[in-house]
């Protein structure tokens, strides 16, 4: 779209919204928005599994979420959750590595603030063999000194590489300010000092405490039947010992003492992030966070879009939410030319402050709801995405019914509620500004 966008934007926007509204209105709220039922399976040793039968492909995605994550670490031993989960997935010998390759089985792991996870993707015909291998590795991990040393080095390298990206630098700056001195502060990889404090005894203790049947959630999306999945899981993971589930405690969030960051980098563009704190997670807060994310920076109807398309101040604009049990963050994001940095910064402030002061009307609320529904559907199209969302909702205590009925939750937000939420979140007095680029 060129200069004529401004003249024709209302017509285009209205057409898009009409199309979205027509499409989404044909989808019933509740579980019917998904192609098949999602059910809970209670396994023999207390393990809980969420299962979705999806015949769209002969692929199975199975995810193991271990509750705790960074919240289960002490400040002096940051990185303990990541390294333990990584070692629990360490292939012990070349033969097992070859077996995985022959089965075309892929697996990965990561750590978040409230949990860590192992994700396995394989051909459904190879699921049983893959689970036999994975369970043998996860239930009998090798915590050798050589492996621990190598993974610590890898963690530091990964952190260094990731923090050399402006987007990640901005994220850490906002998160560090909002969650300073809490368990959410810092990298999931820890740091050089904290990793020095982690020994084999710490890793073994963390594994024995948290890798238990009552603390692991399994989420499966497969074309195989529930009975087959249940049989395989019981056969492979029945030896997993029982133990208490991680108890999530309230995190006292600090006052924001640093609100402006200028990170000097010799880059061709300037990256801008405007961050806001989100309240502790619950159904209403999460739905309104999804809505404000779409309202602020997703697509042609968002408040930031004119900064790119009409004012030509940005290469990219967007908004992202990151949510944890005890709170979250909303970021309004922009990439701009270095010479336009100050103009772009004033423009993004003005767009957000106008939304804070004026709120939205009933028409924009309905548009935001339709965009939020469409965005949620798009972001959960794949098996891996749905298993991730299902697991996240379960760990956050939002539950399976919330996943099934999220459209109803969105529709239930009133104009008064949304404007009150906007006024609470986008308070300029509490925002954090991060600018990354040449001084």
Image (spheres, helix red, strand yellow):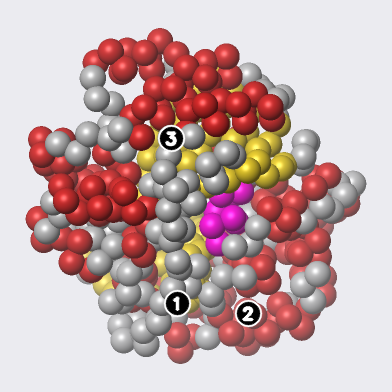
Which label sits in the foreground, 3 or 1? 3
Q: Of the two numbered discs 1 and 2 on the same chain, state the one appearing first in sequence.
A: 1
Q: Position of residue 52 (x, y in %)?
A: 68, 36
Is residue 436 or residue 227 the one in the foreground? 227
Mark 3, other Cα within 10 Å: few <14 / some 14–19 / many ≥20: few
Magenta-span inclusion, residue 131? no
Give the CA distance from mark 3 to mark 1: 33 Å
Say which of marks 1 and 2 sits in front. Answer: 1
- Judging from the image, what secondary structure is the residue with disc 1 in? loop
Q: Which residues are magenta?
A: 387-396
Q: Can you identify the residue that label 2 sits on? A: 422
Q: Position of residue 238 (x, y in %)?
A: 49, 34
Between 259 and 85, the one nearer to me in the picture: 85
Circle 3/circle 1 CB separation < 8 Å: no
In-image side of 109 versus 369 (left or right):
left
Q: Position of residue 134 (x, y in %)?
A: 40, 28
Mark found first going from the N terminus, 3 or 2: 3
Label 1 – label 2 distance at C-alpha: 24 Å
Magenta highlight on residue 395: yes
- Tell me, yes or no, if residue 7 can be seen here: no
Q: Which residue is mark 1?
A: 250
Q: Residue furthest top?
A: 102
Q: Position of residue 132 (x, y in %)?
A: 44, 22
Front residue of this view, candidates 16 and 171: 171
Check disc 3 and report its element: helix, strand or loop.
loop
What predominant SS class does the magenta segment belong to? helix
**What is the C-alpha distance between the residues marked 3 and 2?**
49 Å
Vertical position of residue 207 compared to residue 11: above or below: above
Q: Earlier in the sequence, mark 3 or mark 1?
A: 3
The structure residue drawn at horizontal position 59% and vertical position 36%, both measured from the top left corner, is 220
Q: Label 3, on which residue?
A: 239
């Amino acid at each position: 779209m060129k200069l004529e966008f401004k003249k024709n934007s209302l017509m285009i926007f209205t057409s898009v919204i009409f199309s979205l509204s027509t499409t989404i209105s044909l989808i019933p709220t509740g579980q019917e928005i998904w192609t098949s039922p999602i059910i809970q399976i209670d396994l023999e040793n207390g393990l809980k599994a969420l299962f979705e039968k999806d015949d769209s492909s002969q692929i199975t995605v199975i995810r193991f979420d271990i509750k705790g994550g960074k919240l289960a670490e002490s400040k002096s031993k940051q990185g303990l959750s990541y390294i333990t989960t990584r070692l629990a997935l360490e292939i012990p010998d070349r033969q097992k590595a070859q077996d995985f390759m022959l089965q075309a089985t892929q697996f990965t792991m990561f750590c978040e603030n409230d949990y860590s996870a192992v994700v396995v993707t394989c051909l459904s015909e190879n699921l049983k063999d893959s689970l036999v291998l994975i369970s043998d590795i996860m239930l009998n991990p090798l915590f050798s000194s050589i492996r621990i040393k190598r993974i610590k080095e890898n963690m530091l390298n990964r952190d260094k590489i990731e923090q050399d990206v402006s987007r990640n630098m901005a994220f850490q700056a906002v998160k560090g300010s909002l969650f300073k001195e809490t368990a959410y502060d810092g990298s999931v990889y820890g740091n050089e000092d904290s990793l020095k404090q982690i020994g084999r005894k710490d890793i073994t203790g963390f594994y024995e405490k948290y890798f238990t049947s009552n603390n692991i959630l399994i989420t499966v999306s497969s074309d195989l039947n529930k009975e087959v999945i249940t049989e395989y899981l019981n056969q492979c993971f029945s030896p997993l010992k029982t133990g208490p589930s991680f108890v999530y405690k309230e995190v006292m969030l600090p006052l924001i003492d640093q609100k402006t960051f200028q990170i000097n980098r010799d880059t061709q563009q300037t990256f801008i992030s405007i961050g806001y704190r989100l309240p502790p997670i619950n159904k209403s807060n999460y739905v309104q966070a999804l809505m404000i994310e779409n309202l602020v920076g997703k697509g042609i109807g968002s408040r930031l879009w004119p900064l790119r398309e009409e004012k030509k101040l940005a290469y990219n604009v967007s908004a992202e939410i990151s949510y944890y049990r005890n709170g979250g963050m909303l970021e309004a994001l922009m990439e701009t030319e270095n010479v336009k940095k100050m103009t772009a910064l004033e423009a993004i402030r003005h767009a957000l402050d106008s939304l804070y002061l004026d709120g939205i009307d009933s028409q924009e609320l309905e548009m935001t709801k339709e965009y939020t529904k469409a965005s949620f559907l798009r972001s959960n199209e794949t098996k891996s995405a749905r298993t991730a969302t299902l697991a996240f909702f379960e760990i956050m205590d939002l539950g399976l019914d919330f996943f099934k009925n999220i459209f109803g939750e969105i529709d239930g937000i009133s104009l008064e509620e949304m404007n009150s939420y906007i006024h609470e979140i986008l308070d300029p007095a509490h925002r954090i500004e991060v600018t990354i680029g040449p001084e």
